[in-house]
Amino acid sequence: MTGTSRQGGVRTIFNVTSGNFLEMYDFMVFGYYATAIAKTFFPGDDPFASLMLTLMTFGAGFLMRPLGAIILGSYIDRHGRRKGLLLTLGLMAIGTLTIAVVPGYATLGMAASVLILLGRLLQGFSAGVELGGVSVYLSEIAPKGKKGFYVSWQSGSQQIAVIFAALLGLLLNHLLSKEAVTHWGWRIPFVIGCLIVPFLFWIRRMLEETEAFSQRKHHPSMGQIIRSVGRNWALVLASMLMVVTTTVMFYMITAFTPTFGKTVLMMSDKESFFVTLCIGISNLFWLPVMGSLSDRYGRRPLLLISTILMIITAWPVLYWLVGSPNFAHLLEADLWLSFLYGSYNGSMVVYLAEVMPAEVRATGFSLAYSLATALFGGFTPAVCSYLIHVTGDKAMPGVWLTFAAVCGLIGTLIIKRLK
């Protein structure tokens, strides 16, 4: 027997989200060790310029996401969810290995910087459809009335990656000196990511194709998929606006927190990593809770309430934090933002999976997500660092969050008219 009855269990959720874990783990590790990577591959006399080059390299990976969404998303919509998820995992693994083993600038010169950039671009290309492929798979296997809960575990797996990466960061900072972490210790998390890959391949190979895809008699070609996405351009753009909110907030409270804590608030590495660990745990709690609430009360009420709360509170919370910067205040501020993120994302991801036409569901979803991440979310650490640098105002990340929340509110209001 195949179909939802056999697929829709804890084991299947674990199997399908496993690769999503690797994607987010790699992205988080790169963000956590941005200062060390800057010294290894982008050395210079100006620490700010070196850090910005690294953060821009972090963001560059997101520029490949729209291309990956179109090419790999079309592959998934034509050849199946299972085959596509195996392909994206393989590409992600190659990118991770590149970052783990490439010698530094002192050995290879500019070639080292270029190779790291290529590794990030390959990761971004594969990640362009990983999230969409996982979300679509979960939405198609979910029992009736539980789609929000099921799809929330796509983002939930990302939080497990945040928690794991933060724990590893705390362990490394406990076992190694700061100099050792900067010189070579930062590579250890990437090596561990490479070692996890064979296990992830093994469990993903056990996935079945979804019943919804198998029962479709016609699987469109790439050309047909692209034309269909073109016909639904307004829906994709409205969805992109909604994704801006979640992707900016996520990278703000996870990838940027260690850099913000260390370089702006002058906290220790251990304090910054511990806050990030707590945020991952908080996100992991709120996402399935809010996904379930969206199943019961509807997606739009949660989307509207959470975006309005973000608009009202994002800048005041950051202003309060930088006015009295300490560990407790950073934790409290990020926990509030984590609640808002979980409330919004828990209903937003499944909402987009539902509004996309079935024949281009993976492509349309992934393209909307990738455009938002490429243009806004992925560059959040770089944008926030730049805004602080040029204005001298440490609370400027709150302005960036407010802008993102406005985008989400507009997208939520527009998309209802397009359905």
Image (cartoon, helix red, strand yellow):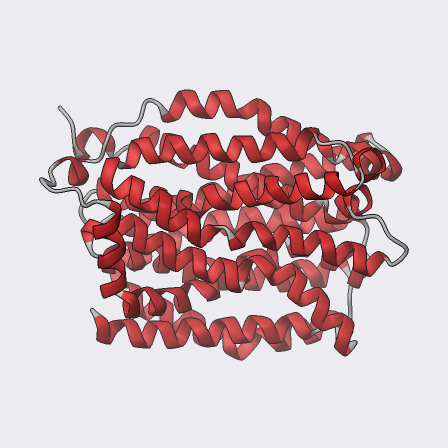
Question: Residue reaching furthest left?
Answer: 217
Q: Is residue 55 visible?
A: yes
Q: Residue at x 44, y 55 (%)?
A: 370
Q: Residue at x 35, y 59 (%)?
A: 347
Dividing the image into 4 quarters, which one contains the N terminus?
top left
**Does 155 sit above or below residue 22?**
below
Coordinates of residue 319 in the picture (x, y in percent): 69, 76
Q: Nearer the viewer, residue 78 or 11?
A: 78
Quadrant of the rendered structure where residue 75 is? top left
Q: Residue at x 48, y 21 (%)?
A: 199
Coordinates of residue 409 in the picture (x, y in percent): 40, 75
Coordinates of residue 397 in the picture (x, y in percent): 65, 70
**Does 305 sit above or below residue 80?**
below
Dividing the image into 4 quarters, which one contains the C terminus?
bottom left
Question: Residue reaching furthest right?
Answer: 45
Q: Nearer the viewer, residue 184 or 84?
A: 84
**Does 269 sit above or below residue 194?**
below
Q: Residue at x 85, y 56 (%)?
A: 47
**Does 243 sit above or below residue 15?**
below
